[in-house]
Amino acid sequence: MLKDFWYALDFSHAVTRKPRKVTCLGQDFVLYRKRDGSVACLSDLCVHRGGALSMGTLVDDVIACPYHGWQYAPDGACVKIPANPEGRGIPRKARVDAYPVRESYGMIWAFLGDLPEEERPPIPHFPEHDDPSFRPVYFEMEINANYERTFENVVDAAHTPFVHGTAFGNPDKPEVPDFEVRQGKWHAEADILLSPPPAKGRWKRLYKDKPEQVVVTNAWYLPNIVKLHVRLPFGDLLLYDHNVPLSRDRTLVKIVGYRNFLTRKWADGNAVKRIEKIFLQDKPVVESQRPELLPYDLSDELHIRSDSLQVAYRRRRRELIEAGWWIGDHEHPAATVIPSPVRREVP
Ligand code: FES
Ligand code: CO
């Protein structure tokens, strides 16, 4: 798993004055909203006896452990030990790791790593979020597979006619025409021509002059985000998926979807059901992948031209691993402690 990136840990609307436990890179964190509306992110592990701060309570902006009441400020420093008599100091080591937080695109992002601010990779830009013609919807699903599998699955155009043949894939047109990958330092994207299936139901009316092919822009953003942008003749549909690594074999996919046509219908809950239906088609296939049984190294399965986006990801990931950005290993990702810039500043 890649450290030293901004990770979207939760939806903005889910984070309130009630402390909330989230998991990422095999580690637990507690998120809570401070009095001024900004969000604090601390390691969910009290240094006294390992209590879960997320089960504690807030006293103004300070969080109190549920076990013996030690209180931690948003920067992770312990500010009160109730069992200590008046005047006794607080041990210098009494602190939990704190992580920098940003709030944008309907998500709470925490920087998981210890790079100084000026060296941190950016949070990607999602322009639809601030465009009033788009309506967002939020959805999440847990998948029992490694996050790199759920991540690569979305930029994999060739699975669509097979896995989604009863939805938007066309089993009669499985060819993926060659496409060009445009790559930057932290992301890559490609416009891929797909053949939609014959229009059904209310889509028939929208598709009066149904195009033979539709351009879908697939993209990935390091460390764990994938985008699917379907460019329909009457508007745009986008899904941004945050593949949050819970452990080696479990991923919480948090999705923000946008649409700029039929927006009232999009916001009414049906959209979420439709996204869920698509993900339920992917889930059993992704969960049953067994690449470890192949006679190749994990980073070296058999690729063809239509896998170019995944190949670009694996190549970039390999560079970052060689540069020391990987944390944990494939066997024991949970046995790691994520470095924090705040800890680094403490003498
Ligand atoms: Fe948190 Fe004791 S375990 S105060
Ligand atoms: Co799919």
Image (spheres, rainbow, N blue to C red):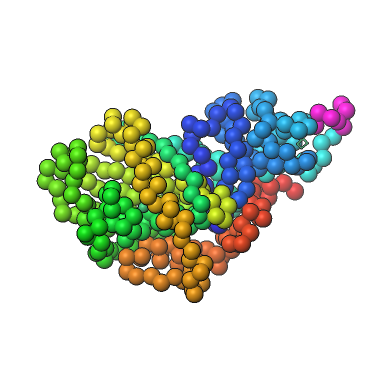
Observer able to see residue 162: yes
Which of the pair 229/279 is nearer the observer? 279
Observer able to see residue 222: no
Percent position (x, y) of residue 150?
45, 54
- Residue lying at the far left of the rendered structure: 209
Which of the pair 341/20 is nearer the observer? 20
Q: Is residue 8 above or below residue 308?
A: above
Percent position (x, y) of residue 273?
36, 37
Check if residue 101 falls in the magenta segment: no
Which of the pair 44/221 is nearer the observer? 44
Segment colored magenta? 81-88
Residue 275 sits in quarter: top left
Residue 37 located left or right of residue 276: right
Percent position (x, y) of residue 309?
37, 62
Residue 128 located left or right of residue 326: left
Which of the pair 147/31 is nearer the observer? 147
- Looking at the image, which residue is at 54% across and 32% down? 15
Numbered marks: total:
0
Residue 192 located left or right of residue 341: left
- Looking at the image, which residue is at 58% across and 44% down? 23
Q: Is residue 20 above or below residue 300?
A: above
Examine the residues drawn in magenta and state their main secondary structure.
loop
- Looking at the image, which residue is at 43% across and 53% down? 284
Percent position (x, y) of residue 238?
33, 44
Image quarter (top left, top right, bottom left or bottom right) of the N terminus: bottom right
- Looking at the image, which residue is at 25% across and 34% down? 262
